[in-house]
Structures are given as C-alpha cells and as structure tokens.
Amino acid sequence: MNLLYLVIQVICIVICFIPFVSTFFSLIIEGASVLASGSDAAITAFATEMITSLIGSFVLCYLLLLVVIVITVPLAYSFIKNIVELKRDDSVKATQFFKQWFKYFTRAWKVTLWKLWKMLSIYLIFFTAYFGAIILMAIFSAIGAEILSVILAIAIAVGLIVVEVIMIQRTFAIALSEYVAIDNEELTAKECVNKSMELMNGYKWKMFCLIFSFIGWAILSVFTFGIGYLFLTPYIQVALVCFYENILNEKGENFKKDDVVEATNVDVITEE
C-alpha cells in the first residue's frame, strides 16, 4: 500500500515539472543554434523568447501543482484511514485507499481547509498589526520621534518570533484532526479540528519528541535513495495512530464506537 502511495506521489511530482524541464532543454538546443549563428538580432529575440517561455512554464507548473494538491489531499486522508484500519486489524486491500480517495474528497478538504484557517488566522492577525505598526513607524519618523520607531521595530521582531512559536504549537494542536474525523464521521470538520486541539492539550511536546525520534531513520532513508521510506512511512503512521489512541485512553475516551457497543452487550449478558 505504501509503495503504491509513494509511486503516485512521485508521478504527481514528475508531472508538475515536465513543462519546465521540456522548456528548459528545448531552449538549450535552440540557444545553441542561435549563438552559433552569431546574429545580434537573433540573440535578442531569443532572449525575449527565453524569458517568456520560462515564465509560461513556471505558471503551468504551478497550475499543475494546484491540481496535484487537490488530488493528493483526499488521497492522503484515505491512506491514513487505511493505516488506522490496518492497525486495528481490519481487512484492507493494498489498493483500497486509491479506489476510495474520491469517496473522502469532500470530507478531507473540509478538514484541511479548517486546519488552514486555524493557521492562517494567526498570520492575518499578525500581519494586520504589522502593517499598522509600519504606518505608525512612518508617522513617528515624519514627526521626528525616532525612538518610538525603534521601539516599534523591536516589537515587530519580537512579535514575529512569538507568532512562529504559536504557529508551531498550533501545527501540533491540529495534527490529530484527520484521525478524529475518521473515527467520528458525525462530527463536522470544524468540530474535528477543535477536538484535535482539545486532545492535544498537554501532549504537544510529547508529539514533537515522537516525530523527532524518527530523524535518524529519515536520514538513513535518504542515503538509501528513498527506498527506506517504504518502511519508514508506515512505521511513522502506525506510531501516530498509537499516539492518538493512547491519548484517548488516558482521557477515558473510546476510539471506536463498535468497541463501546460490544462492551455494553457483554455487560448486559454478564448481568443476565
């Protein structure tokens, strides 16, 4: 399953860069012939053509990248769902995540957009304050109050550091959104993100340590030309599922409703 997932990702990346690579090599071939001709007019025309072609290829690459992102977000969600099911001993086929990606398209993007909003809202607040401070600095400079401008500049630098720290914390706070969404289909995307933030309260540093513990394996995987990621990626994914389930257990919550129903039935039978 992971092999298929990685192959799809590589193919998508290659497709994104095809316009730029093809344009680049065609310009090299054309440029060699133009330089060989020695014509100044031809060289000038080629320079203009080269700039236009490169800009066009960059734009096309970014458009293809947007298409790839639209496709891969629900694909990643479906992949995580299958990892969760495998960890819980459910029957999953290797190609199931690929076949079901469209089924979770809307759900995956709703959760992703709410996660983005949780992140971007912090930046919006900061940059609003930032531009306001820039205007005040200009006013202070105009009236000769340079000391106030310096104070505002220091405040902006400190604010930027604080925002980055908050962003890192927020990244870990919403990291379990997909797992919550997978286990609780009745919850809205907003509720899933908020639930993740609630669950991660007091566990952000533990998650950081967990992810950082894989850095050695990641470095070794690079030296194997990426082959090591065939084993490392599912290893990390299952570890994250275990991390999520451990948090639920520590907070006295259940991760699967079937388990609750089954446990209730057992209690009833026992009482009878």
Image (spheres, rainbow, N blue to C red):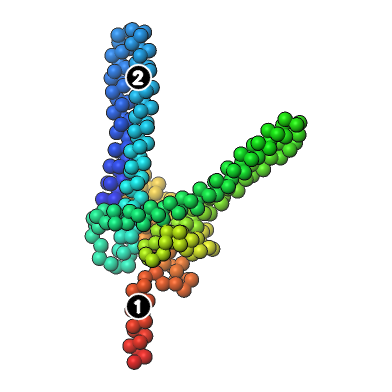
Q: Is residue 201 left or right of residue 111?
A: right
Question: Quick one: which residue is furthest to the top in this view?
Answer: 39
Task: Residue 148 in the image: state x and y as whole percent.
Answer: 73, 38
Residue at point 33% right, 88% down? 269
Asked whether 170 or 223 is in front, the reply is 170
- Residue under label 2, please give it: 49
Asked whether 38 or 236 is in front, the reply is 38
All told, the count of numbered labels is 2
Marker disc for residue 261: 1
Q: Is residue 190 visible?
A: yes
Q: Tell whether label 1 touches label 2 (CB within 8 Å).
A: no
Asked whether 202 or 206 is in front, the reply is 202
Q: Is residue 164 visible?
A: no
Residue at point 34% right, 57% down? 80
Q: Residues within 10 Å of mark 2 (few under 14, many from 20)?
A: few
**Rendered-image quadrant of the C terminus:** bottom left
Q: Residues within 10 Å of mark 1 (few under 14, many from 20)?
A: few
Q: Element at badge 1?
A: helix
Q: Is residue 199 left or right of residue 233?
A: right
Instruction: Inspect the image, locate mark 2, and give the three-letter code of the amino acid beneath it.
Output: Glu
Task: Residue 129 in the image: state x and y as whole percent.
Answer: 62, 44
Q: Element at badge 2?
A: helix
Instruction: Inspect the image, locate mark 1, and give the three-letter code of the amino acid beneath it.
Output: Val
